Image (spheres, grey):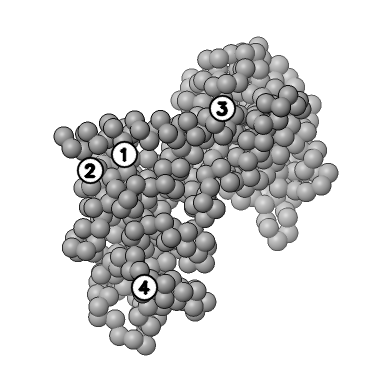
Amino acid sequence: MEASQRTTKSVQKDIKVTKKTVKNQLPLIQDADLTGKVVLVRVDHNVVKGGIIRDPYRIDRTIGTLYNIVERGGRIILMTHVGRPRDKKTGEITCDPSTSIEPIAAYLERKLHSRIHVPALRVEDKRGIHGIDTSINLAIKDLRQHKVGGIYLPNTRWFEGEEATGDLRESFVRQLAGLADVFVNDAFGSWQPHVSTHDIANHLPSYAGFLMQEEISHLDQVLRAERPFVAVVAGAKYDTKIGPLNELYKRVDHLILGGVIYNTYLCAKYNVRLAGVSEDDIKAAKKLVSRDKKVNKIVELPYVVESDTLGEKVQGQYRTIKIKDFVAGKSYGYGLDIDQRSFSDKKVADVIASAKTIFVNAVMGYTPYFTEGSEALDRTIDKNQTAWKFYGGGDTLQEFKSLCPGLYLSVLDDALYYFFTGGGSVLKAIEEDDPYGMQPVQTLIKNKKAVQKGLTR
């Protein structure tokens, strides 16, 4: 009864506050005139690897926005990025099935029972798609006449202008703007200021989709978390998480680490060496160790799974070691997981059980072989029936679904759980201490102010 009462009262209060904040800041799709309009929608359907959809969750979360547009008389042109087809060193763009949106379009056709047209645009050798030619006009005519249910443009990163500068960039944004009457950004997970997420909002009346609104509302809850606030952060590299890790450290009451980040912390604190941890990262982690000596926010997981090899679990080549048994100056194998007994440790269990807000951006082990720690973490968190639980990141969510499918299905409609579609965006916003600070979101806000002042584009 206590959990039920808290859920109802807390959810109503927080949703009311966060929705009001979002409404005041952003131009919302619900305020747009969509009747008879072609609507260019930027989504984050970056779910394809090797030509196969790994998990349709990000696609499914945008269907509400798509339905709303069609129900209100709009016609949809979709666009998303998939993977990283552009070589950062050479600038060459590789357009092949591994980063094609074709599987996404096919999935939407099955899901919506509607034909989704994918334009066949000319690909230049090593330059990707130079531009959108006039052949698309016939497809847009068919779209307006309801001969097709929607258009899905090729991978935005296949276009030469998407990440370009100068004339190439300007040409591409004008081509995109020429396709539609209205722009809707429903891709909070795509925070980089590229043409399809950022520049386009300067050329069309622009609005935030429903998923964008939800992500920002829940991120606002993380940034003003109810205490005690516990964060669980893991990652394959320490240096890529330093910024958000430092910002989270300021905010939380307790911090739990996993993955290579935890290995790096252990090396820095106990003067040991774990395979795969660089000296530069250990040096950087010493600052966190020194800082924590004064405030003791980091909750150590006492049992680590050490392996002689990096890869599959091979009997006799991995074992559980206790943190308290570390010998200074000694070198150890790879730390590839957290033993599940760590979450039965009284201090760890009490910290999680007493939390009012829990934020998780973590895969605790070396997947897909070492998964014991992640499963134990998720099940331990679920025992806390009154805390807000926020999961950020595609890998974090995928691990949850794979290891605890029954639990995942049971909490999908639990108001105290929220699964962000974009982990990188969440960490970026936490680092900047502002859910509205990312450039694509800022451009939407500027667009709203321009409209309010009577300016036109």
The answer to the question of whether label 4 and label 2 lie on touching residues, with beta carbons closer than 8 A, is no
List the residue tagged with mark 3: 28
State the image coordinates of residue 412 (x, y, percent, origin top left). 32, 35
- Toward the bottom, the furthest residue is 329
Task: State whether residue 341 appears in this view.
Answer: no
- Please state if 229 lies on the left or on the right of 161 as rendered: left
Q: How far apart are the two marked residues, 3 and 1, measured between alpha carbons? A: 25 Å
The answer to the question of whether label 4 and label 3 lie on touching residues, with beta carbons closer than 8 A, is no
Name the amino acid type tagged 3. Answer: Leu
Give whichever of discs 2 and 1 has the lower sequence position.
2
Give whichever of discs 2 and 3 has the lower sequence position.
3
The answer to the question of whether label 2 and label 1 lie on touching residues, with beta carbons closer than 8 A, is yes
Question: Which sits in the foreground, 362 or 400?
Answer: 362
Question: Which sits in the foreground, 39 or 95?
Answer: 39
Query: Which label lies toward us, 4 or 1?
Result: 4
List the residue tagged with mark 4: 294
Q: How far apart are the two marked residues, 2 and 1, measured between alpha carbons? A: 8 Å
Give whichever of discs 4 and 1 has the lower sequence position.
4
